[in-house]
Image (cartoon, rainbow, N blue to C red):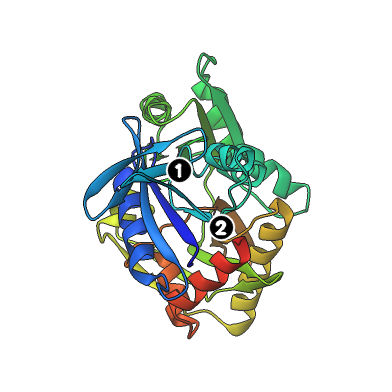
Amino acid sequence: MKPIIALVYGGYSSEAAISKKSASTLFNNINTELFHPILVEISQQHWAAIIDEQTYSIDKNNFTYTKDGNTIKFNAAFITIHGTPGEDGKLQSYFDMIKLPYVNSDSFSSALSFNKWACNKLLSTYQIPVAKSILLRKGDEVNTQKIVSELKLPCFVKPNDGGSSFGISKVKTEQDLHPAITKAFNEGNEVIIESFVEGREFTCGVYKSNDKLTALPPTEIISNNDFFDYEAKYKGESNEVTPAKISKEETEQMQALAMQIYQIIGLKGVARVDCLMQNNGTIYPIEVNTTPGMTEESIIPQQIAASGKKLIDVLTLLIEEAL
């Protein structure tokens, strides 16, 4: 009997709709001769297996569902939730407790990479350059003059514990700080304010199979907007060049950094490291994505194709690793 794989999508963040598209791409690219994929939606309203447009409630005690009087158990899960509870490690902790294997990074690694401030602090101990930053929690006093003095302008204001596509602002004047901080707090309980790093933006995917790390060809992100926001990422307001038009040495440097970060944090499955490269060649990581977008337009599928591999084959390797 073929292993039954739960493709878990949805979640409680603003990116639930993108998560659903990612799950659809995975569903259409899994080798059904080897695996039996089932879509599983997680939302505030329900946890449910979706089969032929029919909904079957998930029993949260053991992550099973009942169909035609039979209780169906999953052999593994592939989490493709962007934001909580799939990207921040909460769902992984639950799967650990019920002993269900999953393709993704474990709960600690996911939670650490999801927390931008904590992740950057860890990377800085390995002499990896990161942007200077300030962390705010709800209720903290906001001293805009001190922020500007420490970080200079422009600076970026982001939710620290939320997805990167929503609630992010590039702030160019001190009077715009308060509105930007309020906007970021609408997406999470913590806000990170980062100094501006001048440079070209890139992202590099990494995955592990058979204990071997593979770095994919980097992508350069050229946004039509002021930065790589939701519209740039999902509404065509950017030009993504894969593979990036950089030298072989720069490519290898970026891939080496992405793999180093993958190992430092202890990631599993497929992840994506976003970074900025300055003119002098210094590379600053800006975010680590442990459940990167997997829609047909997303960067990881682009990079897999550019590497000469097929998405169906890479997914097979990832699922077999989890099993």
Q: Residues within 10 Å of mark 2 (few under 14, many from 20)?
A: many
Tag 1 secondary structure: strand
Q: CA distance from mark 1 to mark 2?
A: 18 Å
Q: Nearer the viewer, mark 1 or mark 2?
A: 1
Q: Which residue is mark 1?
A: 64
Quick check: can you spot residue 279? no
Q: Is residue 230 above or below residue 151?
A: below
Q: Residue 225, image x and y in percent?
A: 31, 54
List the single residue furthest toward the front: 69
Q: Nearer the viewer, residue 48 or 23?
A: 48
Q: Is residue 264 above or below residue 145?
A: below
Q: Is residue 278 above or below residue 132?
A: below
**What's the residue type where badge 2 is placed?**
Val
Q: Residues within 10 Å of mark 1 (few under 14, many from 20)?
A: some
Q: Nearer the viewer, residue 159 or 1?
A: 1
Q: Is residue 36 left or right of residue 257?
A: left
Tag 2 secondary structure: loop
**What's the residue type where badge 1 is placed?**
Thr
Q: Which residue is mark 2?
A: 103
Q: Going from the N terminus, do you reach mark 1 or mark 2 first?
A: 1
